[in-house]
Image (spheres, rainbow, N blue to C red):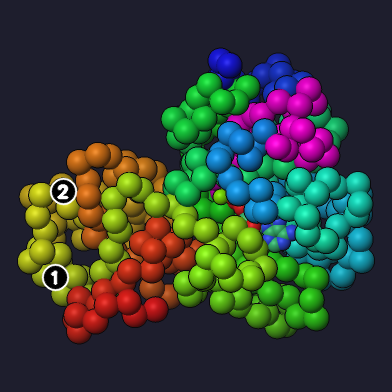
Amino acid sequence: MTTQLLTTSQQDLEKAAELIKAGGLVGIPTETVYGLGANGLDPEAVKKIFEAKGRPSDNPLILHLHGAFQIPDYCRDIPDAAWLLAGLYWPGPLTMVLPVRDNVPKRTTGGLDTVAVRCPDNDATREIIRLAGVPIAAPSANLSGKPSTTTAEHVLHDMDGKIDAIVDGGPCRVGVESTIVDLTGPVPRLLRPGGITPEELEELLGQLVIDRAVTGEIAADAVVRAPGMKYKHYAPAAEVLIVDGSREAAARYIRERFTGGDAVLCFEEELPLYQGLSPVAYGREAEPITLSAGLFAALRSLDRGDVKRIFARCPVGGGINVAVRNRLRKSAGFRIVNAESGDENEK
Ligand code: TXA
Ligand code: MG
């Protein structure tokens, strides 16, 4: 199959919507990462998503809606909190898990009795959803296990020849996947950190349980609420080692160990400390949104045969840094060293 490259012109969005209606696969831009979209109500179309990505079939998909008015079409027993959150953060990087109606196929929900819904903050993709007249099921458009896709070129790299089209909407603004909050229990539970921060959610909802998957390592056979959180993720071919500690201590630690096949992933502010080591910066530590926006592109740029080990610097603190840390820790398989004490695997 030849993968068509489409723009965000009205004519191309109509083409994309036709492809979705016909059961095809289309790479779609969102404010978080590019999605691999199909008609979320068509089990055969959804099956193709899993095949193109090489994704385990028990890992459910997010249904992308045109607006909050569609929530009752696919969800039931909708709590007030869902309306509150949708009113404040949609369109935006927030996914809500709610009890599912039986018109949503099991292939989409992975057989769960809940479904994840979100309304992306991207006019082109919302227009495709409107024109197609169906909710679009879309995981991130990367090959399973690889860093997510934040440009149309990334999608082409992973999916060329496997999908019908890619709509190029430019680079993604947030750069890490949406925040997922489960609203099916007595207390809202954060399943995945993202662009809407834990602090914002807690303030609005009054209470929020942070799932263990957000901070800690999950065993492959563990029962987890967001099935996708248990799989190895975001991993370039090289081994990633997070080096915590002050700028100076980290630079000393890395310089002492750096050999052929090594690479450094750091903050822009730190570039001078790694002169001669061809460091790659993913954003400015002083401006966390640049870190989230740049992380996956930087990991992808280091996914090359000659790079065997990546020393990575990871931001601390709250806000969107919680999401950046979560993705980087997963890509490192939770290998973290403290440059000051030399201790490994501090969580
Ligand atoms: O920002 C995003 O959310 C992007 C863009 C494309 O919208 N999508 C995305 O999809 O990140 P994906 O499939 O890569 O990640 C979806 C996560 C997985 O960890 C999955 O297990 C979880 O959402 N999930 C989906 N449905 C769920 C449900 N009913 N209950 C709990 N977790 C669910
Ligand atoms: Mg993904």
Nearer the observer: mark 1 or 2; the answer is 2
The stretch in magenta equals 20-47
Q: Please indicate whether residue 54 sits to the left or right of residue 336 in the image.
A: right
Q: Which residue is mark 2?
A: 261
- Residue 321 pos. (x, y %): 45, 66
Query: Could you tell which of marks 1 and 2 lies nearer the N-terminus?
Result: 1
Q: Nearer the viewer, residue 42 or 54?
A: 54
Q: What residue sits 51% from the left and 70% below the top?
A: 219
- Residue 7 pos. (x, y %): 59, 22
Q: What residue sits 91% from the left and 61% below the top?
A: 76
Q: Which residue is mark 1?
A: 253
- Quarter of image, res 52: top right
Q: Please indicate whether residue 74 sits to the left or right of residue 88 in the image.
A: right
Q: Amino acid at mark 2?
A: Gly
Q: Amino acid at mark 1?
A: Tyr
- Residue 63 pos. (x, y %): 75, 47
**Residue 159 seen in render:** yes
The 10 Å Cα crowd at callout 2, few under 14, some 14 to 19, many 20 or more, is: few
**Quadrant of the image containing the C terminus:** bottom left
- Disc 1: residue Cβ within 8 A of ligand 2's nearest atom: no
